[in-house]
Structures are given as C-alpha cells and as structure tokens.
Image (cartoon, rainbow, N blue to C red):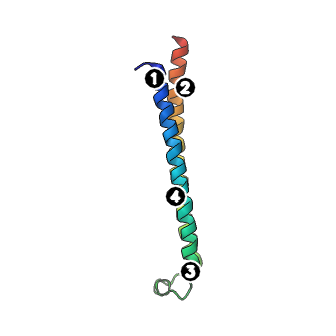
Amino acid sequence: MNNEQIVDELDSLLTLLNEHQKEIDAIHEKFQVALTGVLRLVGESTPTLTKLQGKTEDLTGYLITLNTDVIETTTKSYQSLRKRIEEVIELVSLSDRKS
C-alpha cells in the first residue's frame, strides 16, 4: 500500500468518524429532551423520591450533569481519534513530499 492509498484510507476513516459523531450527538440530544420531559413529570410527591428522601431538583441536576459528562467524554474521545488520524495523514503527506 503506497502513501497515497494510506492517506485515502485515513480520509475515509475521518469521514466515517464524523458520521458517527453526528449520530451520537443526535442520540444524546434526543435523550436529553426525553430526560427533561420525564423529569418534569417527576414531582416531590413521587413515591420513589419520597422513599429516597430526595428532591426533584437534586435528581434533575444530577441526571443532567451526568448526561453532559457523557456527551463531553464522547466528544473528547472522537476529537482525540480525529486528531491522531490527522497527524498520521500529515506525516504520510510529509513523507511523500520528501520522496
């Protein structure tokens, strides 16, 4: 496999990575909308919260924060992969220029 083919494959991987990132972002957004809707339905008189001696605001804050953490972690992972692939593309391209 020559350098041009390697760059093409890596570009293909970047495209795939971008598609997956968009899909995951859409799922996170859909989940957050659903979560917000469910949390609106939960009130102080909910038996589960009463037994746990919890407050709706605390539960809401915790779940939204947790969801935000998941989004940020996923995004950082994708950005890290994207950066490494771009670095390899640059190295291969530089190698081609020197040849």
Task: Give the CA distance from mark 1 to mark 4.
Answer: 33 Å
In this rendering, the answer to whether 58 lies above or below 44 is: above
CB of mark 1 within 8 Å of CB of mark 3? no
Q: Nearer the viewer, mark 3 or mark 2?
A: 3
**Badge 3 is on which residue?**
41
SS assignment at label 2 = helix
Inspect the image, locate mark 1, and give the three-letter code of the amino acid beneath it: Gln
> Which badge, 1 or 2, comes first in the chain's sequence?
1
Closer to the N terminus: mark 1 or mark 4?
Answer: 1
Camera-side residue of 55 and 16: 16
Question: Where residue 83 is drawn, which disc sits there?
Answer: none
Residue 51 against residue 89 in the figure, above or below: below
Q: Could you tell me how far apart the alpha carbons at marks 4 and 3 are, in whole angstroms?
A: 21 Å
Task: Report helix, strand or loop for mark 4.
Answer: helix
Mark whose residue sits in front, 2 or 4? 4
Q: Circle 4: is it few (<14), some (14-19), or many (20+) Cα within 10 Å?
A: few
**Distance from label 1 to label 3 (Cα)?**
54 Å
Location of mark 1 (residue): 5
- Residue named by callout 4: 27
Mark 1 residue element = helix
Q: Residue at position x 54%, y 21% from top?
A: 93
Q: Amino acid at mark 3?
A: Leu
Q: Earlier along the polypeptide chain: callout 2 or callout 4? A: 4
The three-letter code of the residue at mark 2 reads Glu
Marks 2 and 4, how far apart in space?
A: 32 Å
Residue located beneath label 2 in the image: 90
Residue type at numbered disc 4: Ile
| Percent coordinates x, y for residue 84 in the rendering | 50, 35
* Most foreground residue, 97 or 7: 7
Residue 25 drawn at (x, y percent): 55, 54
